[in-house]
């Protein structure tokens, strides 16, 4: 459900904290590490974030414009002279040995669906970045937003998720959890769809959903293939007649780091389309 970062720390000693007269100098190597850096770090402590931070999938791409970029090449990182290097999935060969050789710490973040691990690792990132208070505030706000949306009125309307390639998100995916968190029933769950799979057109015809949500339909996001389900005439007709809400691709990145933003977006958008919830319920 949630993007989180069970951490692995290479050659990092917390005794270093007391030796830093200024905040540690950071390099981030991939999109998801970029988001954490952009949430927690001061601009003047960021040596570089990855070029992916400017992509349509980057939640903080407008903020990322003001930061230096790196392609993550070892020679670039050596020249940047960071104190800390952060990565999630950019497993550059020999990065651990290289960072150790130049005296930098390598922080590696991974995916998981447990919210408590998200909070623990945001806290860890805050400690490494010298931004404990900011990390604590982020976790507190995130927890409050989750609790607030969970306490809002729920609906029995079924939502089906579809991408341009006709893929849907079943049980166990972050998108399915977003649907449930937003206060609606999951179409995939009612049909016992699990994981990521092609959305069967037969199911849609026999038992159409009440609402569609779409992802990655922006011009610069993933494009549909000529053979995709999203080009199927029946689906196109359905999406014209059934309320459809597009979730920005950046809300779906990094395995659910922005799950609350996506859930809030769904509720607000559905209210605007079909007046399901009261204004107070959606926007409070």
Image (cartoon, grey):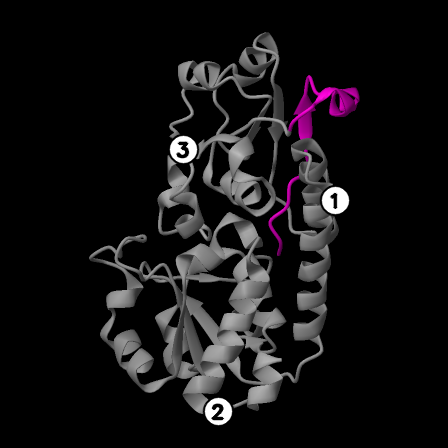
Q: Is residue 219 toward the left or the right of residue 65 in the image? A: left
**Residue 193 in sight here:** no
Q: Residues within 10 Å of mark 3 (few under 14, many from 20)?
A: some
Q: Is residue 34 above or below residue 203?
A: above
Residue 110, numbered circle: none
Q: Position of residue 49 (x, y in %)?
A: 46, 34
Q: Is residue 22 toward the left or the right of residue 250 in the image? A: right
Which residue is labeled 2 in the image?
A: 275
Which residue is labeled 1 in the image?
A: 120
Give the distance between the C-alpha atoms of the residues marked 1 and 3, in whole angstroms.
28 Å
What is the secondary structure assignment of the residue under circle 3?
A: loop
Residue 68, numbered circle: 3
- Residue 241 is inside the magenta segment: no
Nearer the viewer's eye, disc 2 or disc 3? 3
Where's the N terminus, which quadrant? bottom right
Q: Nearer the viewer, residue 199 or 122?
A: 122
At 65% across and 27% down in the image, what residue appears?
22
Q: Which residues are magenta?
A: 1-22
């Amino acid at each position: 459900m949630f993007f989180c970062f069970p951490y692995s720390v290479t050659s990092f000693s917390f005794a270093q904290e007391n030796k830093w007269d200024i905040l540690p100098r950071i390099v981030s190597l991939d999109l998801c590490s970029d988001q954490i850096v952009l949430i927690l770090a001061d601009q003047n402590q960021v040596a570089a974030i990855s070029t992916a931070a400017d992509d349509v999938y980057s939640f903080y791409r407008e903020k990322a414009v003001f930061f230096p970029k790196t392609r993550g090449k070892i020679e670039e990182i050596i020249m940047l002279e960071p104190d800390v290097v952060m990565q999630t999935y950019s497993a550059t060969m020999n990065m651990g040995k290289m960072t150790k050789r130049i005296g930098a710490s390598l922080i590696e973040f991974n995916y998981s669906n447990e919210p408590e691990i998200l909070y623990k690792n945001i806290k860890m990132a805050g400690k490494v970045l010298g931004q404990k208070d900011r990390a604590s505030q982020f976790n507190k706000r995130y927890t409050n937003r989750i609790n607030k949306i969970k306490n809002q009125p729920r609906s029995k309307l079924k939502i089906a998720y579809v991408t341009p390639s006709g893929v849907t998100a079943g049980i166990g995916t972050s998108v399915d959890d977003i649907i449930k968190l937003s206060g609606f029933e999951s179409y995939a769950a009612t049909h016992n769809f699990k994981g990521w799979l092609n959305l069967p057109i037969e199911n849609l015809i026999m038992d159409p959903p009440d609402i569609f949500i779409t992802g990655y339909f922006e011009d610069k996001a993933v494009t549909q293939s000529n053979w995709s389900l999203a080009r199927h005439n029946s689906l196109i007709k359905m999406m014209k007649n059934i309320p459809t809400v597009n979730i920005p691709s950046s809300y779906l990145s990094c395995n659910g780091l922005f799950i609350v933003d996506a859930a809030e977006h769904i509720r607000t958008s559905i209210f605007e389309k079909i007046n399901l919830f009261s204004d107070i319920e959606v926007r409070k």
